[in-house]
């Protein structure tokens, strides 16, 4: 039987195998779908992860730019702390970034953000299914973060289509409300 780690490796490899042309095409289509999604929603403060370039993650800098262009007044990003938690900073002119040991651009200094102001969180993932379950990188940072703000809209962004089902979801796994891809926007029943 396939386990979560095997699925994580397989779908990360699929994303890494995208040609640069296909990667750019999918990012462009995803940004367009994200922009259309934002036109139907009003958010004051949102949270985004910053992309790990070496893992062919979604171009979140383009998504942040779209958010700011479409009236999201505050965007927060996070820094991974050694104890398995995230620390959050406003993405503004005072922010200074440094690349972490995992290849993630993270705040070195800036203004701390209040997570209770957030309306929406963009959630990193490797793959997701048609029920809103996701496979992340396996450290649980986002599940712990999202459990603190259960009412926030949880939006995944993925360069690939959904799996039919991820059978490994535990009680600590926080499902998505929506996932935006180059192909479609998926809404999940809760």
Image: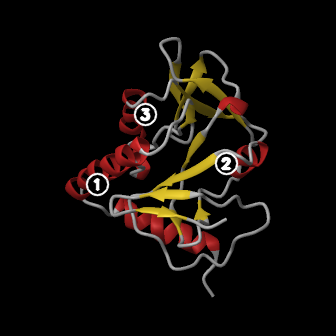
Number of numbered discs: 3
Depth check, mark 2 against mark 3: the one in front is: 3
Q: In the rendering, at what x and y percent does residue 135 appear?
A: 59, 64
Q: What's the distance in space between the residues labelled 1 and 3, CA to CA?
A: 21 Å
| Residue drawn at the location 67% of the way across and 29% of the way down | 117
Q: What's the distance in space between the residues labelled 2 and 3, CA to CA?
A: 21 Å
Q: In the rendering, at what x and y percent does residue 169 appear?
A: 70, 70
Depth check, mark 1 against mark 3: the one in front is: 3
Q: Quadrant of residue 189?
A: bottom right
In terms of sequence position, does the residue under pointer 2 or pointer 3 come before the other? 3
**Callout 1 touching callout 3 (CB < 8 Å):** no
**Residue 23 disc label:** 1
Q: In the rendering, at what x and y percent does residue 4 appear?
A: 63, 72
Q: Residue furthest left?
A: 21
**Callout 1 touching callout 2 (CB < 8 Å):** no
Helix, strand or loop at mark 2: helix
In terms of sequence position, does the residue under pointer 1 or pointer 2 come before the other? 1
| Residue drawn at the location 57% of the way across and 78% of the way down | 165
**Callout 2 touching callout 3 (CB < 8 Å):** no
Helix, strand or loop at mark 3: helix
Q: What's the distance in space between the residues labelled 1 and 2, CA to CA?
A: 25 Å
Q: In the rendering, at what x and y percent does residue 157 appear?
A: 46, 53
Q: Which residue is mark 2?
A: 142
Q: Which residue is mark 3?
A: 67
């Amino acid at each position: 039987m396939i386990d979560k780690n095997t699925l994580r490796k397989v779908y990360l490899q699929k994303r890494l195998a995208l040609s640069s042309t296909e990667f750019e095409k999918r990012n462009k289509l995803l940004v367009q779908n994200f922009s259309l999604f934002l036109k139907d929603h009003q958010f004051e403060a949102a949270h985004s992860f910053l992309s790990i370039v070496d893992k062919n993650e979604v171009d979140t800098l383009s998504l942040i730019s779209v958010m700011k262009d479409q009236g999201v007044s505050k965007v927060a990003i996070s820094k991974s702390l050694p104890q398995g938690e995230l620390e959050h900073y406003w993405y503004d002119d005072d922010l200074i970034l440094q690349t972490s040991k995992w290849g993630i651009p993270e705040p070195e200094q800036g203004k701390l953000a209040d997570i209770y102001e957030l309306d929406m969180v963009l959630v990193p993932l490797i793959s997701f299914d048609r029920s809103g379950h996701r496979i992340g990188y396996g450290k649980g940072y986002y599940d712990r973060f999202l459990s603190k703000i259960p009412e926030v809209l949880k939006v995944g962004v993925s360069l690939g289509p959904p799996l039919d089902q991820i059978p490994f979801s535990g009680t600590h796994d926080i499902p998505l409300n929506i996932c935006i891809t180059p192909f479609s926007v998926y809404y999940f029943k809760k």
